[in-house]
Image: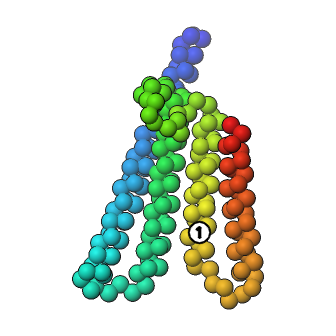
Amino acid sequence: MKSLFESMLWNSRYIVMLAVVSSIVGMLLLFLLSAADMGHLAIDYIEMTFFGKDYPDFHTRAVSHIITAVDDFLLATVLLIFALGLYELFIDKIEIAHGDKSSSNILVINTLDDLKDRLGKVILMILIVAFFKNVLHVTFDDPLNILYMGAGILMVSLASYFSHKSSAKH
């Protein structure tokens, strides 16, 4: 009875495959949607530049779309790292990732701390991009807004600095 229970308990780790497959599907969707959005933006630019079609406030819209695409690409990267990390931690090592000397080790996850560190860095980048996206819409009609903007930039800089300092120790 004990052996059967332990076997069932051990094999229950395969339920993690639901999270792995779902993360890969979400990653693919985000990459495809963001790439399609960038394609539409490029078409709009070509129409505006070469065919004289009028797009009012195109520059602001383009910057907003590009920042959103970067944000989506980073989130897709989080999903990829998460999927690979879960698979390596709970299912099996990915032999091709460990044997390929020409590739980066960023996708090789050996411990839960590795997964946490890699996800934390990418999530920090997502937050920085989101901060940058929101800064585009700040109006400087109040001196307090300028102070808040400076404080926000300082916090982002400190977070980036400490993240870099932390990775330098490893």
What residue lies at 35% left-to-right and 71% top-to-bottom? 41
Which residue in the protein does label 1 denote? 132
Q: Residue 2: horizontal and vertical position, in percent? A: 60, 11
Front residue of this view, candidates 65 and 167: 167
* Disc 1 residue crowd, few under 14, some 14–19, many 20+, Cα 10 Å: some
The answer to whether residue 101 is above or below residue 3 is: below
Q: Residue 4: horizontal and vertical position, in percent? A: 53, 13
The answer to whether residue 38 is above or below residue 46 is: above
Q: Residue 128: horizontal and vertical position, in percent? A: 61, 62
The answer to whether residue 2 is above or below residue 55 is: above
Q: Using the rendered view, name the quadrant where residue 169 is placed.
A: top right
Q: Using the rendered view, name the quadrant where residue 125 is placed.
A: bottom right
What residue lies at 59% left-to-right and 72% top-to-bottom? 134
Q: Quadrant of the C terminus?
A: top right
Quick one: which residue is furthest to the left in this view?
Answer: 51
Q: Is residue 108 left or right of residue 127?
A: left
Is residue 94 something that shows in the picture? no
Is residue 123 something that shows in the picture? yes
Q: Quadrant of the N terminus?
A: top right
What residue lies at 43% left-to-right and 85% top-to-bottom? 57
Q: Residue 15: horizontal and vertical position, in percent? A: 49, 32
Q: Using the rendered view, name the quadrant where residue 54 is placed.
A: bottom left
Q: Secondary structure at mark 1?
A: helix
Q: Amino acid at mark 1?
A: Phe
Front residue of this view, candidates 76 and 154: 154
What residue lies at 70% left-to-right and 69% top-to-bottom? 152
Front residue of this view, candidates 87 and 42: 42
Front residue of this view, candidates 163 and 116: 163
